[in-house]
């Protein structure tokens, strides 16, 4: 760990590891396999980058998108790390040159897409290359249970066969229990260790509101973030174009991003978002995986996303710098119908469609629940939390009813039918609806048969979604969507505690109060804002000259620290968090001049 700590300080400019990092780094340096699940913005990249720098050979990083590779490589080059990406945007001679550097041990890390890695000639090349480790980033793409399954990722099991002695580390911020098991199994990581360091992003406030004039709702939401960057997610290309134009007419620098735009326009708009401030990206889900822009202050959804994992990942693009951020979703039942239509019209096998439908149900449970949004999100991923006090249901409790008896009936019906049937079947039993299937299993003879006629089918669906969201029931997506009682559900039946559920009205109400406004400056005070602005101007000049986003030079957090501590020497400047040796040599004097010049004017 001495060498790792030295690299952390000299290269990255940090004096200590964040929670969880050192244990993972030590494990992988020792040549062992690992599965790592850490929240967005918690420093997952260091968990493979530092071991790659400590071990002999080149670290091979498998990444899904060219834009993400470029972002990572640009950041590493600024740190003085020898890194390159090999992808389809390169010429044959550029690829040859990169391979030569790997053979000659002139590179520390190489980024490739899974499609490239799986090519026979590339696997042959790697078999003769000095490799320190394999890192599989965005590892949820490996699993059929994951929200972004990609067949080429699933084929990465070949690494265990061809390179059994080289450590493999798989990393993601978004994986429920079935997804985690699948990743470990498919990548043959069972002989290594699983590191789980929670999902909570306490700096993000979650709000879900009924859809009622969505454009105006989004506009009201983002008005408090004038001069800040954000993302607005839309369901369709047309909606994306319309919303971007509408915001532009109202004075916002809003840019569209979707698969229907030509590649040049998409790349240009993404570059503007990364390189400039106060840009709002209005986008379909085609945008965003791996976007490392740290100062995104808000993420808004004009429709429900595909599932809870997608919602968590997309909202997680806000506040990566740890500063307060906000997530809003406006929601209508027609959104769910459209998402279900997408599922049904896809070419996915029926088993995959069943999984996707169950995941939509879990998301609807989050929307309809009366309890803390954050608790439900974390429970979904197997994480525990107290009510957060920083979501709409905590700040502005919704209209509820005493759902204790309804919950007892629902859970009893699941138990008495053998914990293997889906929601629709259980509702039919509770409603006393006779069918050939119910008679075949003799469930019409159960005491729960017909015990739930006081609620309509839609009301029972809402109740069941909330019980799943409350983690009293769970949907076994690996077993055709059958409902099972969780340990918490069993405890609920024994304790007979009171349970408040949100009233079903056909739409979701988040209450009449406005969400509490968050100041982007309220978590750090005491720095000179005029000096901070001057440092940002200088950073922008440098980033434009280097053709990289400003945050790759220094994060806002580092600039705030400079504006607070006002270092006057290179030695003092080196103590700023995020200032490693390479950045000290490149930029130390330049930023010192701004600080000293500002001091002389005070």
Image (cartoon, rainbow, N blue to C red):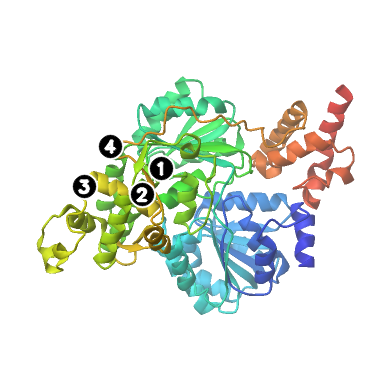
Residue 157 at what x, y percent from top left? 47, 72
Decide: is 327 above or below 480.
above
- Mark 1–mark 2 CB contact (< 8 Å): yes
Asked where in the image residue 473 lies, by quadrant, the reply is bottom left
User: Could you tell me which quadrant the N terminus lies in?
Assistant: bottom right
Q: CA distance from mark 3 to mark 2?
A: 14 Å
Mark positioned earlier in the residue sequence (3 or 4): 3
259 or 488: which is nearer to us?
Answer: 488
Label 4 crowd (10 A; few <14 / some 14-19 / many >=20): few
Where disc 3 sits, the SS reads helix
Q: Which residue is mark 3?
A: 457
- Residue 466 image label: 2
Task: Describe residue 237's horizontal placement relative to residue 80 as left or right.
Answer: left
Q: Which residue is mark 1?
A: 370
Decide: is 317 above or below 475.
above
Residue 181 at what x, y percent from top left? 46, 68
Label 2 crowd (10 A; few <14 / some 14-19 / many >=20): many
415 or 102: which is nearer to us?
Answer: 415
Label 3 crowd (10 A; few <14 / some 14-19 / many >=20): some
Observer able to see residue 349 = no
Q: CA distance from mark 1 to mark 2?
A: 8 Å
Q: CA distance from mark 4 to mark 1?
A: 15 Å
Q: Which residue is mark 4?
A: 506
- Mark 4–mark 1 CB contact (< 8 Å): no
């Amino acid at each position: 760990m001495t060498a790792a700590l030295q690299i952390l300080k000299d290269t990255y400019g940090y004096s200590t590891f964040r929670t969880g990092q050192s244990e993972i780094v030590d494990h992988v340096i020792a040549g062992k396999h690992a599965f790592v699940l850490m929240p967005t913005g918690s420093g997952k990249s260091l968990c493979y980058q530092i071991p790659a720098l400590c071990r002999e050979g080149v670290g091979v990083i498998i990444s899904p998108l060219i834009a993400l590779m470029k972002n990572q490589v640009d950041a590493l080059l600024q740190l003085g790390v020898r890194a390159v990406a090999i992808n389809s945007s390169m010429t044959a001679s550029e690829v040859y040159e990169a391979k030569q550097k790997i053979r000659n041990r002139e590179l520390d890390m190489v980024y490739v897409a899974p499609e490239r890695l799986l090519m026979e000639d590339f696997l042959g090349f790697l078999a003769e290359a000095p490799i320190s480790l394999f890192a599989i980033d965005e590892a949820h793409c490996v699993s059929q249970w994951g929200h972004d399954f990609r067949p080429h990722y699933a084929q990465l099991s070949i690494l265990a066969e061809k390179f059994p002695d080289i450590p493999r580390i798989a990393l993601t911020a978004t994986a429920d229990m079935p997804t985690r098991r699948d990743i470990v199994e498919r990548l043959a990581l069972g002989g290594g260790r699983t590191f789980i360091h929670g999902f909570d992003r306490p700096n993000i406030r979650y709000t879900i509101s009924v859809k009622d004039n969505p454009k105006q709702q989004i506009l009201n939401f983002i008005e408090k973030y004038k001069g800040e960057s954000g993302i607005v997610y839309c369901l369709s290309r047309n909606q994306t174009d319309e919303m971007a134009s509408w915001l532009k007419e109202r004075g916002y620098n809003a840019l569209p991003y979707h698969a229907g735009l030509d590649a040049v326009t998409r790349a240009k708009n993404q570059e503007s978002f990364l390189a400039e401030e106060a840009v709002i990206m209005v986008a379909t889900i085609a945008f965003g995986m791996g976007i490392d822009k740290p100062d995104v202050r808000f993420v808004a959804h004009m429709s429900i996303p595909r599932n809870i994992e997608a919602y968590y990942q997309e909202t997680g693009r806000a506040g990566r710098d740890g500063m307060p951020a906000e997530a809003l979703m406006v929601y209508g039942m027609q959104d769910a119908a459209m998402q279900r239509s997408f599922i049904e019209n896809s070419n996915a096998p029926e088993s995959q469609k069943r999984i996707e439908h169950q995941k939509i149900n879990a998301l609807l449970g989050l929307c309809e629940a009366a309890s803390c949004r954050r608790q439900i999100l974390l429970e979904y991923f197997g994480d525990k939390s107290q009510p957060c006090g920083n979501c709409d249901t905590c700040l502005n409790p919704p209209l509820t009813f005493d759902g204790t008896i309804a919950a007892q009936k629902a859970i009893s019906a699941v138990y008495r039918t053998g914990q293997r049937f889906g929601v629709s079947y259980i509702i039919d039993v509770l409603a006393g609806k006779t069918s050939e299937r119910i008679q075949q299993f003799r469930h019409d003879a159960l005491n729960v048969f017909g015990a739930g006629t006081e609620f309509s089918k839609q009301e029972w669906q809402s109740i069941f979604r909330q019980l799943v969201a409350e983690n009293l029931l769970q949907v076994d997506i690996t077993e055709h969507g059958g409902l099972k009682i969780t340990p918490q559900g069993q405890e609920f039946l024994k304790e007979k505690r009171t349970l408040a559920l949100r009233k079903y009205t056909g739409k979701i109400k988040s209450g009449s109060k406005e969400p509490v406004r968050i100041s982007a400056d309220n978590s750090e005070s005491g720095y000179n804002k005029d000096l901070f602005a001057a440092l940002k101007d200088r950073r922008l000049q440098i980033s434009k000259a280097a053709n990289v986003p400003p945050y790759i030079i220094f994060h806002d957090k580092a600039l705030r620290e400079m504006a607070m501590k006002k270092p006057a020497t290179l030695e003092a400047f080196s103590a700023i968090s995020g200032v490693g040796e390479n950045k000290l040599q490149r930029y130390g004097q330049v930023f010192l001049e701004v600080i000293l010049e500002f001091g002389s004017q005070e």
